[in-house]
Image (cartoon, rainbow, N blue to C red):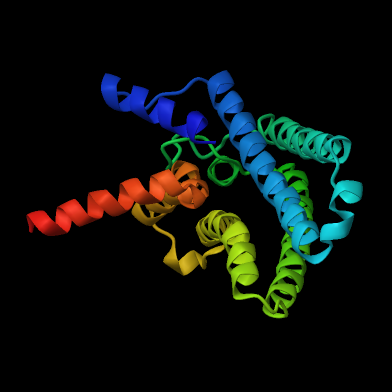
Amino acid sequence: MICTTVPKAMHNSLWDTSNISYSGCATHVFLLIFFMGAEYFLLTVMCYDRYVSICKPLHYETLLGSRACAHMAATAWASAFLNALLQTVNTFPLPLCHGNALGQFFCEIPAILKLSCSHSKLREFGLLVFSICVAFCCFVFMVFSYVQIFRAVLRMPSEQGRHKAFSTCLPHLGVLSLFLSTGTFAHLKPPSMSSPSLDLALSVLYSVVPPALNPLIYSLRNQELKAAVRTMMTGCFQEH
């Protein structure tokens, strides 16, 4: 997702421009929705992986073999592609009767819909509602899975086993929380809180920050990285 928004923003900054072509904007929207959807669906699949590995460890190979993992990953990517295609095709035929200046540093559907006064955009709103319902179902599944995971972990008699289980889940839970909290607040905040500067800051927050932090969060289980971070922090404290 970060490779969709940041390069164009860097290009605009370096060349002191804020223009984007119609086809470029459509491509931008498609790629943004595709990567966001793919990340969300893959996070859901990863949640199921954690659930099976902790709550049903004896059935892990049966439920999550290599073929099952390949099918779930393919379904996640295909669903994200279909959703992005439908959203893009339904949005860009709409006439723009409120100008063509977006209040963002990248193209996104809510900003484009604000520029349109066509009655056809009700169809796009319907598609957005459907996508939100699908996302909500995934969210309910993830909440249910983590409730079962934490119940299973707390019943473990071994402290070492609980620590290992939590260390498996916490990086995924951290990425998921960051992704959902920033994206949800950016798109579902009350209209009274909306302002161009706040919208821009939130767009940067949910489109740039979570992907940038993903490698760091997932690497926290790496012992060499932990040792390097510990050494760096110790050196900083000693200097001060």
Quarter of the rendering occupied by the C terminus:
bottom left
Looking at the picture, tell me which residue is in the foreground, 180 or 148: 148
Image coords of residue 114 (percent x, y):
55, 46
Q: Residue 126: image x %, image y %?
A: 78, 51
Locate residue 177 relative to residue 84 in the image: left or right: left
> Does 174 sit left or right of 127 as displayed?
left
| Foreground pick, 167 / 8 | 167
Of residue 232 and residue 44, the one placed in the foreground of this image is: 232
Figure label count: 0
Q: Give the farthest residue toward the left.
A: 240
From this view, report whether residue 47 is shown above or below residue 111. Answer: below
Which quadrant of the figure contains the N terminus?
top right
Question: Is 90 placed above or below 198 here?
Answer: above
Q: Is residue 221 visible?
A: yes
Point out the residue furthest to the right here: 62
Q: Which percent across, then down, holds residue 123?
A: 78, 45
**Residue at the (46%, 23%) spot, across then down:** 20
**Image position, residue 69 (x, y; %):** 81, 40
113 w.r.t. 197: above or below: above
